[in-house]
Image: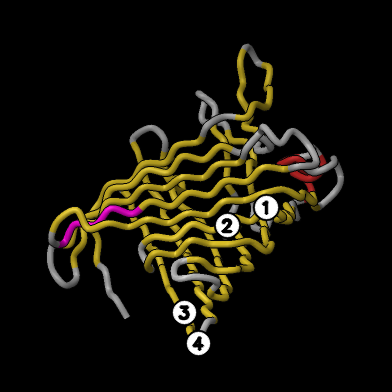
Amino acid sequence: MATNIVLDYDFDYKKGNWSWDNKAIAGYGISKQDGIGWRKNDDRLILNSLLGYKAAQYWLYTFYANFQSQFTNGYAYDAANNRTLLSAPFAPAYLTFGPGFAYKRSDNFRINISPAAARITIVKNDSLSSIGSYGVTPGSKSLFEFGASLDAYYKVNLAQNIAFENILKLYSNYLEKPQDVYMDYTANLFMKVNKFVTVNAGVELLSDPKAKIPVTANGITAYHSLLQVKQIFGAGLTYKF
């Protein structure tokens, strides 16, 4: 049994050659399985902003900013259902920003590239910062990175009332191991049943070289960087403002 709630809100502005696209996503969900109990299956706060000035028909000079965090604590569980703190509010939180350029064919197809992007990782939780979670120096509450980022969005209507959405975020740190690329890819399939009911299926793949997951074997806990996968399938009530 599971329940989820998601608020997805866009607010955009355009005047002359200037455009300002903003998106806010707030989501939280919990699920219950036999032998496991209640656990959260979604927890995200995402704010995305893209300021653009038209350079050509589909090209823009841009400045973008992205903020990501979560609302509650997150845990990793071992086979005995013992839990280890993995994340907390503002632990981590990511703030990425920088100038760049974008190709925007429409509101459903855009790619923004920033070759000079700053990324700040915040770890406000004392226990997580003390062990150097998410790449911060042990005891430090933040990490500064400078590199390149790519943010792409593509949505296509496969058929009447069926839409397929793709969201891709990449980041490479020039200052340390640029080959270790942060990757966050989400694919969503939306199927509209009627005005209020929507069936959706989705998958998210997240690879963060600095996010170490505790893995326990033979009584010894080690921290490894792993590919994280989230899958969702369900039906829900949708209201569009």
**Sequence order check: which comes first, mark 2 or mark 4?**
4
Q: Which of 124/194 is in front?
A: 194
Tell whether position 238 is magenta.
Answer: no
CA separation, marks 2 and 4? 36 Å
Report the magenta residues as a range.
161-165
Amino acid on which the number 2 mark rests in the picture = Gln
Question: Which residue is at a point 19% across and 71% down the rendered structure image?
Answer: 196
The residue at which mark 1 appears reads as 115
Element at badge 4? Answer: loop
**Sequence order check: which comes first, mark 2 or mark 3?**
3
The residue at which mark 3 appears reads as 12
Percent across and percent down for residue 160 are: 13, 61
Asked if marks 1 and 3 touch (Cβ < 8 Å), the reply is no
Q: Callout 1: few (<14), some (14-19), or many (20+) C-alpha neighbours within 10 Å? A: some
Element at badge 3? Answer: strand
Q: Callout 4: few (<14), some (14-19), or many (20+) C-alpha neighbours within 10 Å? A: few
* Rendered image quadrant of residue 194: bottom left
- Checking the image for residue 88, the label placed there is none
Question: Which residue is at a point 61% across and 41% down the rendered structure image?
Answer: 182
CA separation, marks 3 and 4? 14 Å
Element at badge 2? Answer: loop
Disc nearest the viewer among 2 and 3: 3
The residue at which mark 4 appears reads as 16
**Sequence order check: which comes first, mark 1 or mark 3?**
3
The residue at which mark 2 appears reads as 70
CA separation, marks 1 and 3? 24 Å
